[in-house]
Image: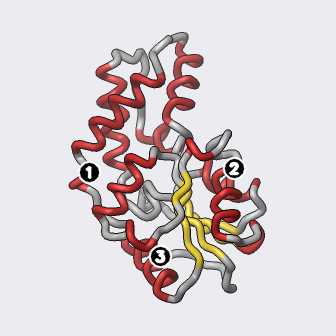
Amino acid sequence: MTLDLPDRDFGGYIFDCDGTLVDSMPLHFRAWVTSFEHHNAPWKWTEDEFYANAGVPDRVTTMDLNQRFGASIDPDSVHDYKLEWYSKHLAELQPVAAVAELAKQYHAEGRKISVASGSDLSIVEPSLEIIGLREIFDIIVTPKDVEHGKPAPDMFLLAAEKMGVAPGECLVFEDGQAGIDAANAAGMASVFVDSRGE
């Protein structure tokens, strides 16, 4: 994978977790499908739809699907079952090598770095631990830290604030359109990470 990096330095670097630092999207897709099947969801969840919703909080995705299909599946229950299934398969995770190496490089150079993920902290921390990156990130922002998740800019703005860097001096690494939209809304430059390898 080749990353199309801007030709300038930034004051802070914000990384999404799933599909950006951690090659976890195939595992997340399997967790979604397993949870929807367990809950007898009346829809077929496709990979295309899954990737189109990358970065959107689980419960929001389930509520949107409920509305579209006239269903009333409990978003909390879908989320909890998916989380439990995913947690049992964490050992399968690998890093997204190009992005993980860049994060390590920035850390070694003393640059300010953070994670802003649409996943729960209970997923983000062990995922980073498994790929050997947990110790380099002092700042991790997840949906529970803000009022609105991606595509709202809240998580990125909070990460910038915690790093002590102005939003316009931050570069975001993201694999989801919701994350790119959130970076744009925050007034930040971004780098798209193609988690599907297409």
Q: Quadrant of the C terminus?
A: bottom left
Residue 167: give x, y in percent of width and height: 75, 66
Q: Quadrant of the N terminus?
A: bottom left
Q: Circle 2: is it few (<14), some (14-19), or many (20+) Cα within 10 Å?
A: many
Label 1 and label 2: CA atoms lie apart by 28 Å
**Sequence-wise, which precedes: disc 3 or disc 2?**
3
**Sequence-wise, which precedes: disc 1 or disc 3?**
1
> What residue would you read off at disc 2?
154
> What residue would you read off at disc 3?
103
Label 1 and label 3: CA atoms lie apart by 21 Å
Disc number for residue 90: 1
Q: Secondary structure at mark 1?
A: helix
Q: Circle 1: is it few (<14), some (14-19), or many (20+) Cα within 10 Å?
A: some
In this orientation, which residue lies closer to the viewer: 157 or 33?
157
- The residue drawn where x is 58% and y is 66% is 14
From the viewer's perspective, is 101 left or right of 172?
left
- The residue drawn where x is 52% and y is 75% is 3
From the viewer's perspective, is 115 left or right of 132?
right
- The residue drawn where x is 38% and y is 66% is 134
Against 19, residue 60 (above or below) is above
Kind of residue sitting beneath label 1: Leu
Kind of residue sitting beneath label 3: Ala
